[in-house]
Image (cartoon, rainbow, N blue to C red):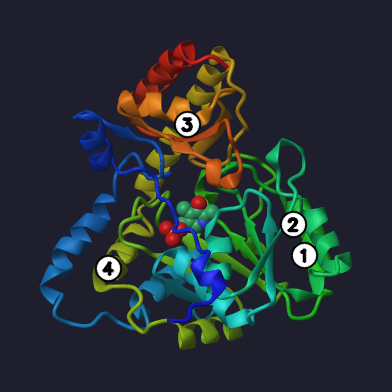
């Protein structure tokens, strides 16, 4: 059968190594995974209760309009319900935006070392993915992205700009002022949407961070993605939100599968969305974990980047394949970043304090073993 080159060349997304697989391959029982930025507190307890109560309804189709969930989230986030839709994780919404707004041969634009979902979804849709080099310290370079749109010969092909803020895997962010200057320039470019992906926004500690949601009413070309996969601890359920102009939402609702968010995901999301006590515990645990990592990595002489998210990217100064192999033998799963072109870096998610300490202990043994 004839298949397009873009599809044939797709590299399947490589998720963090599963715990069970590591146990099997290395003959271990006690394995920790700090590889997928998952919530160390588990799911919100309210979400679990809601799911138990909803089990008797599983013979029914879910609500295709996500009415009840959207009503509640709309109130809590102060975003009009017609400016919001729900996806099977924000990943589905990324895919849908690209399919809706880009013709084959047109393009998306993002930063170098951006979250991989953008380029994978683009390629699957026969859409080009342009990236702009990072500013120093692994920062997303918004002025360079605006320059690309205005001056580069390929700039006119770009229909969507993806700004992961904070970015994964670097953990860096762009501040409110940088966003304002960028949006003022982007607003002058016709047929261009700017998508802020705010998967880690709940963890941000920087004072000058501003959410893209602030700009929704000012700019019709701004979209914001949110997810329940990280701070809300519901990665396994797959719930993401798109906040955008009403016309954009209407198009996404036309293209998406009618039952893209299943019944259990809808009820759990509704229960978890205002579980502030859970969110707060997670934020405190994350702050402590990050500070612990900074201190210990510095003591080990391993450079790391200050992170606004629930993970830290650091330089092992060694062949990362060897380092990773040795960590796995010790039952510690971190995330190598070879697919981003980082040959010596690892990304380490914040876990429980006990997990963080175990990861650091393993790391200190491993770097003592492997020469830089
Ligand atoms: C984890 C992550 C997401 C979340 O994806 P879901 O499909 O909602 O689980 C989105 N964007 C970035 C940058 C991420 O790291």
In this rendering, position of residue 333 left or right of residue 208: left
Q: CA distance from mark 3 to mark 1?
A: 40 Å
Mark pair 3, 2: CA separation: 37 Å
Q: Earlier in the sequence, mark 4 or mark 2?
A: 2
Percent coordinates x, y for residue 198 in the rendering:
56, 56
CA gap, disc 3 and disc 4: 42 Å
Indicate whether 223 appears above or below 309. Answer: below
Counting every numbered tag in the picture gives 4
Q: Which residue is at 42% across, 34% downward?
A: 334
Q: Residues within 10 Å of mark 1 (few under 14, many from 20)?
A: some
Disc 1 Cβ-to-ligand 1 distance below 8 Å: no
- Observer-nearest of 34 and 225: 34
Task: Check disc 4 and report the residue beneath it.
Answer: 267
Nearer to us of marks 3 and 2 is 3
Q: Secondary structure at mark 1?
A: helix
Q: Which residue is mark 2?
A: 179
Whichever of callouts 4 and 1 sits on the residue coming sooner in the sequence is 1
Q: Which residue is mark 1?
A: 183
Percent across and percent down for residue 277 are: 36, 46
Tell me the residue that label 3 is attached to: 321
Q: Is mark 2 within 8 Å of ligand 1?
A: no
Q: Residue furthest front?
A: 1
Residue 152 appears in the picture as rendered: yes
């Amino acid at each position: 059968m004839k298949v397009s080159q873009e599809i044939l060349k797709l590299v399947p997304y490589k998720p963090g190594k599963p715990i069970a697989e590591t146990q099997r391959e290395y003959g271990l029982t006690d394995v920790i995974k700090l590889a997928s930025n998952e919530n160390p507190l588990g799911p919100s307890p309210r979400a679990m209760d809601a799911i138990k109560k909803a089990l008797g309804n599983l013979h029914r189709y879910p609500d295709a309009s996500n009415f009840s969930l959207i009503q509640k989230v709309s109130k809590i986030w102060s975003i009009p319900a017609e400016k919001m839709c729900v996806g099977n994780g924000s990943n589905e919404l990324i895919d849908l935006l690209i399919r809706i707004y880009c013709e084959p041969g047109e393009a998306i634009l993002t930063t170098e070392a951006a979250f991989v979902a953008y380029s994978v979804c683009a390629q699957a849709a026969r859409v080009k993915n342009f990236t702009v080099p990072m500013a120093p310290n692994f920062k997303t370079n918004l002025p360079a992205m605006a320059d690309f749109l205005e001056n580069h010969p390929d700039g006119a092909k770009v229909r969507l700009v993806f700004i992961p803020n904070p970015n994964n895997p670097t953990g860096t962010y762009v501040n409110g002022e940088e966003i304002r200057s960028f949006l003022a320039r982007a607003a002058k470019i016709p047929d261009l949407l700017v998508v802020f992906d705010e998967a880690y926004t709940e963890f941000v500690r920087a004072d000058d961070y501003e959410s893209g949601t602030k700009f929704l009413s000012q700019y019709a070309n701004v979209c914001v993605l949110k997810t329940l996969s990280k701070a809300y601890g519901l990665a396994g359920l797959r719930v993401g939100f798109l906040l955008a102009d009403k016309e954009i939402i209407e198009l996404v609702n036309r293209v998406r599968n009618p039952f893209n968010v299943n019944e259990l995901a809808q009820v759990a999301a509704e229960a978890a969305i205002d579980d502030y006590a859970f969110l707060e515990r997670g934020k405190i645990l994350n702050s402590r974990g990050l500070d612990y990592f900074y201190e210990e990595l510095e003591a080990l002489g391993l450079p790391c980047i200050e992170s606004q998210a629930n993970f830290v990217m650091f330089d092992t100064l060694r062949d990362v394949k060897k380092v990773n192999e040795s960590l796995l033998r010790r039952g510690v799963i971190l995330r190598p970043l070879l697919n981003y072109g980082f040959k010596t870096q690892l990304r380490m998610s914040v876990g429980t304090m006990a997990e963080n300490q175990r990861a650091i202990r393993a790391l200190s043994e491993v770097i003592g073993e492997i020469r830089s």
